[in-house]
Image (spheres, helix red, strand yellow):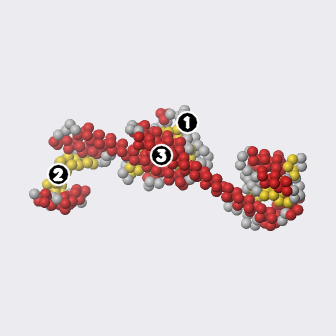
Amino acid sequence: MNGNQLRVLVVDDDEDDIFLVKELLKEGLPEWNVTLDYAMTGDQAISLIEKAKHHICIFDYHLGKTNGLSLFNKIKNNGDFAPVIFLTAQGDQEIAVEVMKAGATDYLVKSRLSVETLARSVRAAIKLEEQKTQRSLAEHSLKIQGELLQGVSNATQKLLTITDFDSAISQALAELTKAANVESAFIFKHSQKPGDTPICNLEFFSSKNKYIESNELKKTDLSYADLGIEEVFLPLNRQQSVLVYEKEEAEFPEGFFKELNITSLLLFPIEINSTTWGLVALGSKKNGRVWLNNEKSILEVVVANIGGEIKRQIEKVAFQLIVEGTSSRVGNEFFRSLVRHLAKALSVKCAFVNEPINIKDLQCAILAGWDEGDYVDKKIFNAMNTPGEEVLAGMLVFHPDKIMD
C-alpha cells in the first residue's frame, strides 16, 4: 500500500447504499486518504478491477439478476484479488457461511452498519492482507534462498571437480544463471591504460536462450558507456555490488544489453590481489524484478569462488611463463629472462634481481632489471628508501652471523 492511500471498490445496485458506504468510510477512516470507485453491475465491477488495483472491495450480496458471490468467484478465478467484505440487507446465516467459505474477509448486515462496524471490518481486512503479504514474501524468500544455496553448491562443485579452467567457469556460470533465475549471466574482464577510457572484454557468457551463442556478441573493447552502465564503474572499483534498473530517460539499457532485452542487472566486482579484475553481471528480462538482500549475499559467495578460480588460473599461467622463459637460460641470461617473464606474468611494470654488496651501508647492485618494456642497465645503488631496505634490514636482524662472514 502506498503511504496512506486506500482505494476502495464498492459494488452495489443501490445508489443510496453506495453514498452511505462512502460517507461511513470517510468518517471512520480519518487516517486514510480514501479513493472510492463504484459499480452497480458485475460487468462494471470487472471493468474497474481490470483498470486499477484496489486495496479493499465491498460487495452487496444481491446485485439484481446475479449476486456478489458469483462476482467474487469470477475475480478469484482470474488470479490475485483484494480482500472482499460482503454486505446484505438481511442477516442470513447460510449466506454468511457461504461467503466466508468462499474466502471473504467479513460479512456485514446493512441494517446494523455503522461508522464503527465498517471501519473495524476494513482495518481488520487491511491487517489480514498485510500479514498475507508478509507471509508470501517470507515463503518466497525461503524458496529463493533454498534454490540459491543449491546453486552455490552446484557451482562450487563444478569449480572443484572440473580440471579444464574454461569448462569449469562456464559450467559454474550456467549453474549461477539457473539458481538466480535470470536469463543471462556474464563475466567481463576489466582493463584500463593510464589516461584511457576503462574498457572490458566479455570472457564468459551463459544464457537460458539456446538460440543465443556467445560468438554472436561483441566481446572486446567494450566501454562501460557501450554497455549503458557507465555510472557503475566507480562503485564497482570500490568493490561494491550494484543494481541497475531500466528507467525512463536513462541510458540503460543501451547497446549490448538492449540487444538482449535486459531490463535489470545485478553486478558484482571480481577482486584479485586487492584490485578489480572484472565483474559478474546477472541480467533479467522481468520488469520490476526484485532482488532480496539475502539473494545478494548468497550470490556474492559464488562470485568470490569464481574469482578464486580465476586467480589460481592466473597464477598457474604466470608460473608456466616463468618456467618456460627461464628453463633453458644460464648465468646473466637466466636473470635477464627471469625479470622479463616475471613482469609479464604478474602484470607489473618493473622487476629486478639485486645483489647486496655492502649490507651495512645498504649498497646493492642490479644483476638484471626490467622497467616498462626494456632492460635496465647494471648499476650500484643505495637501498635506502627502497623496498630492498626492508629485505636487508631483515637479513641483519635474523642472520647477523652470516652477514659478518
> Number of callouts in the render?
3
Looking at the rendered structure, the kind of residue marked 1 is Asn
x, y percentage for residue 40? 85, 51
Mark 3 to mark 2: distance in Å? 49 Å
Determine which of the numbered discs, if any, sits on residue 355 in the image: 2
Looking at the rendered structure, the kind of residue marked 2 is Glu
Mark 1 to mark 3: distance in Å? 23 Å
Q: Is residue 220 positioned above or below 359 on the image? A: above
Could you say whether the residue bearing mark 3 is in a helix, strand or loop? helix
Mark 1 packing: few (<14 Cα in 10 Å), some, or many (20+)? Answer: few
Q: Identify the residue at image location x=27%, y=48%.
A: 350
Looking at the rendered structure, the kind of residue marked 3 is Ser
Q: Nearer the viewer, mark 1 or mark 3?
A: 3
Could you say whether the residue bearing mark 1 is in a helix, strand or loop? loop
Quadrant of image for the C terminus: bottom left
x, y percentage for residue 387? 25, 56
Q: Identify the residue at image location x=74%, y=53%.
A: 82
Quadrant of image for the N terminus: bottom right
Mark 2 packing: few (<14 Cα in 10 Å), some, or many (20+)? Answer: some
Please tell me in which quadrant of the rendered image residue 310 appears.
Answer: top left
184 or 149, nearer to the observer: 149
Mark 1 to mark 2: distance in Å? 59 Å
Q: In this orientation, does residue 81 appear?
A: yes
Q: Nearer the viewer, mark 3 or mark 2?
A: 3
Circle 1/circle 3 CB separation < 8 Å: no
Q: In this orientation, does residue 276 appear?
A: no
Marked residue nearer the N-terminal end (3 or 2): 3
Q: From the image, tell me which residue sits under label 3.
A: 153
Q: From the image, tell me which residue sits under label 1.
A: 209
Q: Is residue 95 left or right of residue 398?
A: right
Marked residue nearer the N-terminal end (1 or 3): 3
